[in-house]
Amino acid sequence: MTLHEDPDAWRSDDEFSSQAEGDFDPISALRWHAEYTRRLDPWLKEQAERRARDADACNEGREASRASGVIIPKVQRASRFMSAAELAGLPIPERKWLVRDLVPARNVTLIYGDGGTGKSLLSLQLAVAVVLGSRWIGREVTPGRAVFFSAEDEKDELHCRLADILRAEQAQFEDIRDLTFRSLAGEDALLASFEGAGKPLIPSSLCQELDDLLAELKPQLLVLDTLADLFPGNENDKAQARQFVGILKGLAIRHDCAVVMLAHPSLSGMASGNGTSGNVAWSGSARSRLYFERIAEEGYEADPDARVLRTMKANYGPKGGEIAVTWRNGVFVADPAETGLDRMAATAKAERVFLKLLAEATGQGRRVNHAGGPTYAPKVFAASPGAEGVKARAFRSAMEALIHNGKVRIAEDGPPSKRRQFLEVAS
């Protein structure tokens, strides 16, 4: 009988506690401590022996596993610590891209877009362009094989979209034999699983199947559509987000391919214009993040077929780029590139119309401001019949330039307790 199993083993403890309520007797305390130690020693010894037995059983289990042919997984690392001096004299490697400045090779790119925007079609066009060695929305791509993994669209829908893309590319289905696709619509498409909070994500059997396919095909591109169907956890959990992107990055590095993951933005992500969803770890872990969205001014969509692909994050290239495209005959087509002269002409027009409308408003006794609200000048002028097709965004840029150049000034009037600012043409 050990100490923790014997209810009488702690009797001296109770006696000591009751005695402590009265006068403290140091001799009794010493006797209590000696009795406590005598009874505790066998229990400690038994715990040590139990741990030793568990360790022996574990070792025996390992030996039995080896004898039965069961593989005990070990952490395999290709990396090592090295001195930077070892790089001396080595050729500087060229950074690899699938699409320069947009989609890096051997890494993860996130493309966000609201449902119905067309991000699945856009990424399927990318996969076809890689296989054909053609251009994607006006950009050159690295040619090779591609894998398109869809958990949203059925095979028939993918068939229809591929037919539209091939018609636009003037190609045949036989020309895209290096494009491998799979529809998991209505199936379990999770690429990982986890046993609960605080537990690491574990690649699923489907992820292993995908891993084996990539090893066989050695593609340049893997498209995963979409995050909501493939990720099993909580998008707001930072650790889970980083672990899942880490699984995808492992695929990209092992198979020397670009991984493009499609995702839906949250309502707040759409409202703010950054197009994100969930924890910031998604954006932080991916090396590139693109946002595909409709073009709307103050909630008004002038052309429902117009879209823009924005570069929201680029670790290896410039941020802030925009590619304007238009949906035509089932595919997205890049809009003609604007030349320097075109931009100069558009800027001059926006400034001219802004000054015209500001003078008209002032002459009518109506005031507009530069800060916002119902009388915000770009918004008011964009809604005017005399806007000449200039949008609020262009008016905003024109206003900032005119204020900076001194052609428009910010005036104010009213009592000291309630001053009001407004715009006027500088004299």
Image (cartoon, helix red, strand yellow):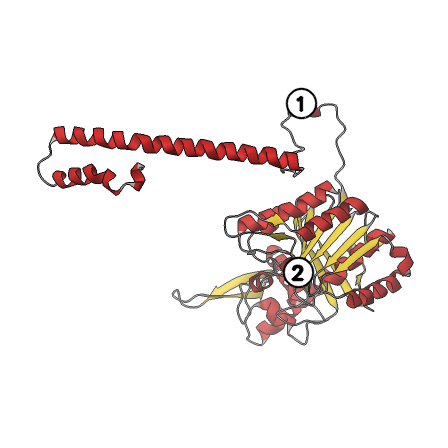
Q: Residue at x 41, y 31 (%)?
A: 49
Q: Is residue 103 visible?
A: no
> Between residues 173 and 116, which one lies in front from this camera angle?
173
Reading the image, the residue beneath label 1 is 85
Q: Residue at x 33, y 34 (%)?
A: 43
Residue 205: x and y, percent?
67, 51
Amino acid at pointer 2? Asp
Question: Is disc 2 surrounded by few (<14), some (14 to 19) or many (20+) residues within 10 Å?
Answer: few
Residue at point 12% right, 38% down?
Answer: 19
Question: Is 202 left or right of 155, judged from the image as shown?
Answer: left
Rendered position, 184 above or below 61: below
Q: Position of residue 385 (x, y in %)?
A: 67, 76
Image spot of residue 215 (x, y percent): 77, 44
Towards the viewer: 17 or 407: 17
Please tell me which of labels 1 and 2 falls first in the chain: 1
- Left or right, residue 395 beside residue 16: right
Q: Residue furthest left?
A: 23
Pick the front one: 169 or 415: 169
Answer left or right for 187 relative to 422. right
Up-down relation of residue 9 to residue 376 (above or below): above
Using the image, tell me which numbered label, if any, was put on residue 362. Answer: none
Displayed quadrant of residue 398: bottom right
Q: Residues within 10 Å of mark 1 (few under 14, many from 20)?
A: few
Of badges 1 and 2, the one in the foreground is 2
The quarter of the rendered structure image containing the N terminus is top left
Which residue does the numbered mark 2 point to in the structure image? 188
Q: Could you say which quadrant of the image residue 126 lies in?
A: bottom right
Judging depth in this view, the residue of 406 and 143 nearest the camera is 143
Which quadrant of the figure contains the C terminus?
A: bottom right
Q: Disc 1 on helix, strand or loop?
A: helix
